Image (cartoon, grey):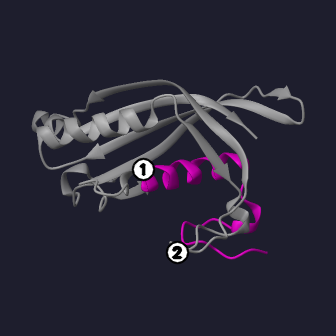
């Protein structure tokens, strides 16, 4: 039996779908932490916030919402479609637009490595033992729009949603 990772996941038995989700979160964390980026202190979390109006901003939420039921065999690897919703919650319209552009450009046609986090989670910076790469998620569809929750039209000025689609090969 494996150790619980704090997300309620037994690390020794994570599925390829869960490994893809976690790889997307860490990929975004590394992209937002690029040297000199004004966004390097933004939290990236899995799942939508329960009450978007009570958030501490800025924050980026990542949710996977669909995987195609059909898998295709490519040699010794399989291929499936996977979709994500990524929402950036920020403190102003200009910040929202900048964050949306940053995420869009970072993810557009990206090939995101899927790592085997069953081996352990990313070590601290400077430690060479990263989990091995077991596959990839290739973004082939991305769109972006401001979001309105409920009747609060003001919130649309502060939230940008990206819908991401792509192919997972593991």
Tags 2 and 1 touching, CB below 8 Å: no
Which sits in the foreground, 11 or 104?
104
Q: Which percent across, then down, holds residue 66?
A: 58, 33
- Quadrant in which residue 130 is drawn: bottom right
User: Residue at the location (28% across, 56% down)?
Assistant: 36
Q: Is residue 5 one of those drawn in magenta?
A: yes
Q: Mark 2, residues whose alpha carbon is within 10 Å: few (<14), some, or many (≥20)? A: few
Which sits in the foreground, 36 or 8?
36
Q: Is residue 150 above or below residue 8?
A: above
Q: Which percent across, then down, holds residue 29?
A: 43, 56
Q: Mark 1, residues whose alpha carbon is within 10 Å: few (<14), some, or many (≥20)? A: some
Q: Which percent across, then down, holds residue 128?
A: 63, 70
The reply to whether residue 73 is visible in this rendering is: yes
Looking at the figure, which quarter contains the C terminus?
top right
Q: Which mark is residue 120?
A: none
Q: Which residues are magenta?
A: 1-30
Q: Earlier in the sequence, mark 2 or mark 1?
A: 1
Please, what is the dominant secondary structure of the magenta stretch?
A: helix
User: Residue at the location (45% across, 55% down)?
Assistant: 30
User: Residue at the location (50% across, 72% down)?
Assistant: 125
The reply to whether residue 46 is visible in this rendering is: no
Q: Which mark is residue 124?
A: 2
Name the side, left or right, on which 92 lies relative to 10. Answer: left
Q: Which percent across, then down, holds residue 98?
A: 22, 39
| Alpha carbon distance from label 2 to label 1 | 16 Å
Q: Is residue 27 above or below residue 104?
A: below
Name the side, left or right, on which 98 lies relative to 125. Answer: left
Q: Which mark is residue 31?
A: 1
Q: Which residue lies most toward the right here?
A: 76
Looking at the figure, which quarter contains the N terminus?
bottom right
Q: Is residue 92 one of those drawn in magenta?
A: no
């Amino acid at each position: 039996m494996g150790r619980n990772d704090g997300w309620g996941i037994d690390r020794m038995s994570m599925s390829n779908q869960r490994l893809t989700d976690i790889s997307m979160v860490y990929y975004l964390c590394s992209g937002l932490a690029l040297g000199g980026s004004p966004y390097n202190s933004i939290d990236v979390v899995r799942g939508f916030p329960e009450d978007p109006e009570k958030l501490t901003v800025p924050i980026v939420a990542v949710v996977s919402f669909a995987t195609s039921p059909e898998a295709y065999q490519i040699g010794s690897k399989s291929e499936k479609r996977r979709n994500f919703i990524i929402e950036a919650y920020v403190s102003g319209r200009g910040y929202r637009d900048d964050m949306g552009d940053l995420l869009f450009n970072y993810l557009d046609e990206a090939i995101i490595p899927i790592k085997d986090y069953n081996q352990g989670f990313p070590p601290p910076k400077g430690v060479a033992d990263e989990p091995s790469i077991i596959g990839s998620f290739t973004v082939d569809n991305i769109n972006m729009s401001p979001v309105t929750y409920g009747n609060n039209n003001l919130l649309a000025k502060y939230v940008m949603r990206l819908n991401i689609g792509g192919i997972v090969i593991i």
